[in-house]
Amino acid sequence: MKTLQELGEAVGTARRELRLKQKDVAAQAGITPESLLRFERGQVSEFGSRKLLAVLAVLGMEIDFVKTGTSGSLDELRRERGRE
């Protein structure tokens, strides 16, 4: 992911796969439902790290840093190919 919009879309996809409602995730993360809605839709220019980490924790996810231009694992490449 390279943009905040892509990150928001990925969070929204993960939330839907877990069959969680935006309002419930937002409440557990300590943010407003509107803030989460706008983030998932890519309608924000900023989304603070505290908010992001709180939302990811609710979803059972974490951030993993990967150096740009490095090859991913076979599973990552398969997932990426499935998105094309």
Image: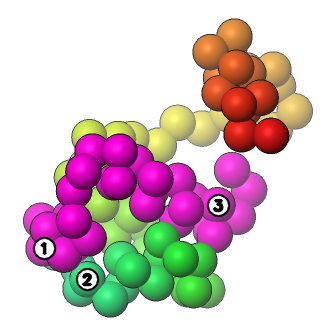
SS category of the residue bearing label 1:
helix
- Residue drawn at point x = 32 percent, y = 89 percent: 34
Q: Which mark is residue 27?
A: 1
Residue indicated by mark 2: 33
- Residue drawn at point x = 33 percent, y = 70 percent: 51
In magenta stretch: residue 18? yes
- Residue drawn at point x = 26 percent, y = 83 percent: 33
Q: Looking at the figure, which quarter contains the C terminus?
A: top right
Query: Circle 1: is it few (<14), some (14-19), or many (20+) Cα within 10 Å?
Result: some
- Magenta range is 1-28
Sequence order check, earlier mark of 2 and 1: 1
Sequence order check, earlier mark of 3 and 1: 3
- Residue 29 visible to an observer of this rendering: no
Question: What's under tag 2, amino acid-wise?
Answer: Pro
In magenta stretch: residue 60? no
Is the residue under label 1 in contact with that under label 2 (CB below 8 Å)? yes
**Residue 15: image location, x then y, percent:** 33, 54
Residue indicated by mark 3: 6
Question: What's under tag 3, amino acid-wise?
Answer: Glu
Q: Marks 3 and 1, Cα distance to the nearest angstrom?
A: 23 Å
Q: Marks 2 and 1, Cα distance to the nearest angstrom?
A: 7 Å
